[in-house]
Image (cartoon, rainbow, N blue to C red):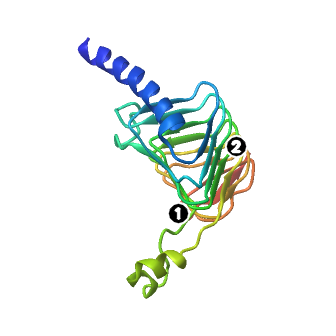
Amino acid sequence: MFGKLYRRLFVAISWRYNSLKFRIFTSGEVKVGRNFKVLGRLYVNIDKTATVEVGDDFVFLSGGNLNPLVTNRSGCIVADKHSRIKIGDNCGLSSTILWSRKGITLGNNVKIGGDVVIMDSDAHSLNYLDRRNGLIDVQNRKDAEIVIGDDVLIGARSIILKGVHIGARSVIGAGSVVVKDIPANCIAAGNPCRVIKHL
């Protein structure tokens, strides 16, 4: 009884708090559509030069035992300097990490399973000598925009890396590491992720 009441209270408070946090406490240009819901604790860091646009009917479950598939890790949305995150209508995410240094676009009706990482940067240079100096490391990292088409389903604990384009209506199997483009209308899975069936 008490557990159910606590959960309802947690959901009601976090939904309203996160909505305010997105609209008021972020420093970049942020546009949020109708029925914006973030349930749980969400880490948000949006640079003042970044742009974030979220469509209507957005739902983000973040930690708080709201999804049994996740490790109860809080999700995050990070948009670094001059980057852009654009999320279409009717998208659902669960403890997802969205980290943009260039650009991440999610189409309409995209569903993303628990603990998925979507990151459009290597974060560090691949040259070990560069990594010895923080400034040179950052200057020589590689960034490339990620585009995920309409109606895509991404399975739990997948990783989508820089420069990837996933075509509309495709399904990415759980635990996949996507390093190259995936065409529309297919099922793809594995590490590295490959097409296993056309729909």
Q: Which residue in the structure is indicated by mark 1? A: 191
* Quarter of the image with the C terminus in it: top right
Q: Residue at x 52, y 63 (%)?
A: 191
Task: Count up the numbered dots.
Answer: 2
Q: Amino acid at mark 1?
A: Asn
As drawn, is 96 to the left or to the right of 107? left
Closer-to-camera residue (45/161) = 45
Q: Residue at x 49, y 68 (%)?
A: 123
As drawn, is 31 to the left or to the right of 138? right
Closer-to-camera residue (126/180) = 126
Q: Secondary structure at mark 2?
A: loop
Q: Residue at x 34, y 33 (%)?
A: 64
Decide: few, some or many residues near mark 2? Use Cα within 10 Å; few <14, some 14-19, many ≥20.
many
What mark, if any, has residue 146 been given in the picture?
none
Q: Amino acid at mark 2?
A: Gly
* Quarter of the image with the N terminus in it: top left
Decide: few, some or many residues near mark 1? Use Cα within 10 Å; few <14, some 14-19, many ≥20.
few
Vertical placement of 71 versus 56: above or below? below
Q: Earlier in the sequence, mark 1 or mark 2?
A: 2
Location of residue 8 in the rendering, given as x and y in whole percent from the top left corner: 37, 17
Location of residue 54 in the rendering, given as x and y in whole percent from the top left corner: 63, 38
Q: Which residue in the structure is indicated by mark 2? A: 107
Judged from this view, the residue extending furthest toward the left is 2
Q: Secondary structure at mark 1?
A: loop
Vertical placement of 142 versus 32: above or below? below
